[in-house]
Amino acid sequence: MKLLVFSAKDFEREFLEKANRKGHQVAYTRDALDSHTAIQAVSYQAISIFSGDDASLVVLEKLWDLGVRYITLRSAGYNNIHIKAAKRYGFKVAHTPDFSPHAIAEHTVALVLALNRKIVLADRQVHNYNFMLDDLMGFNLHEKTFGIIGTGRIGSLVAKIMHGFGCSILANDLVPDHSLTEFCNVHYVDKSELFEKSDIVSIHIPLTYENHGLVNKERLKTMKEGAMLVNTARGSIVDTNALLEVLENNHLGGYAADVYEKEKGVFFKDNSKTGITDEKLKKLLSFSNVLLTPHQAFVTREALENIAESTFYNLDCWEQNIACKNELGYETLIS
């Protein structure tokens, strides 16, 4: 099968090439998929896209006309593809549901520790031979209340790690994980209570229509003064305007994230020479109590190996006309 990999990053290629054991014909483009770049998929049966690619209705229409029939996502989330339209056209679509929850969970905790203990500032000061401690005060995580929105594969691992730090853990999920209640003393509460009582709130839910802007002005204002918000899920779950307001009013103690609401055109690019035009992002980065990483939580060897393996597992299944467990709607395929 001929595959075009959109948004291909240099560090991915060795993993993808190693996983291509069936000899699929693979080409790579650094360009993100959108209505302009879709033409590159001419003569390809399949494409692979990343979380920042645009597979909206108009793009899908172009891809179908070009002969593309299979779309495999190198991500767990699939909010960037119009699933109903894809199914209506007849595309086969699969994602990578479990590439490495440990990678995301561990990065989440790294963000918490780095922001709380002022690691970035301390490193910058020491490299300038400044060994003063005046601006480096943090707080103990031990006995703090850690709130987790979403206790799926990633959120449950975060709960276990923070339990090890001695945190009291509050959680919210449509389907509570009773093993966390038993072994990590996790207490499931409604979202209002979680935001009100937590010293740190961490987000681990997919982006859906219902979750868009879930962390809004009202919820942010109910958080404890000086509390920390962490987002390694999707940027649009947090209302950026509301976030900027609480940061400006010094109500929020800090914000740590690996995602941003408007990543397209900015993330996965070196903008150091050209700068950026997103005024909200500029303002967000101006706060000393904001720590933002460039959607890198998935960048571990283990995660990249799993993503590559899933990518070609999906293609192999489709080429052999057998059920693909990663295909969206898989449950209906085997019922």
Image (cartoon, rainbow, N blue to C red):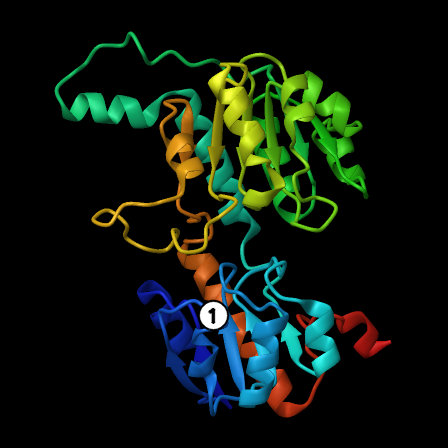
The local secondary structure at tag 1 comes to: loop
- Give the residue at mark 1: 33
Q: Nearer the viewer, residue 111 or 264?
A: 264
Q: Residue furthest right?
A: 335
Can you give x and y, in whole percent of width and height, for residue 148 in the image? 66, 32
The residue positioned 39% from the left and 24% from the top of the image is 287
> Furthest residue to the left?
129
Q: Name the one closer to the observer, 272 or 160.
A: 272
x then y, percent, for residue 115: 42, 25
- The answer to which image quadrant residue 135 occupies is top left
How crowded is the residue under tag 1: few (<14 C-alpha within 10 Å), some, or many (20+)? many
Q: Residue at x 16, y 16 (%)?
A: 130
In the image, residue 317 lies at what x, y percent? 63, 84
For the C terminus, the quadrant is bottom right
Q: What amino acid is found at the position of numbered circle 1 in the picture?
A: Leu
State whether residue 218 appears in this view.
yes
- Using the rendered view, name the quadrant where residue 188 is placed: top right
Residue name at image x 57 percent, y 50 percent: 101
User: Picture coordinates of residue 82 (x, y %)?
Assistant: 66, 67
- Say which residue appears at 75% left-offset and 34% top-offset: 172
Q: Is residue 226 above or below residue 239?
A: above
Q: Is residue 233 visible?
A: no
Relative side of 138 to 168, left or right: left
Tell me which corner region of the image, top left, top right, bottom left or bottom right, holds residue 187.
top right
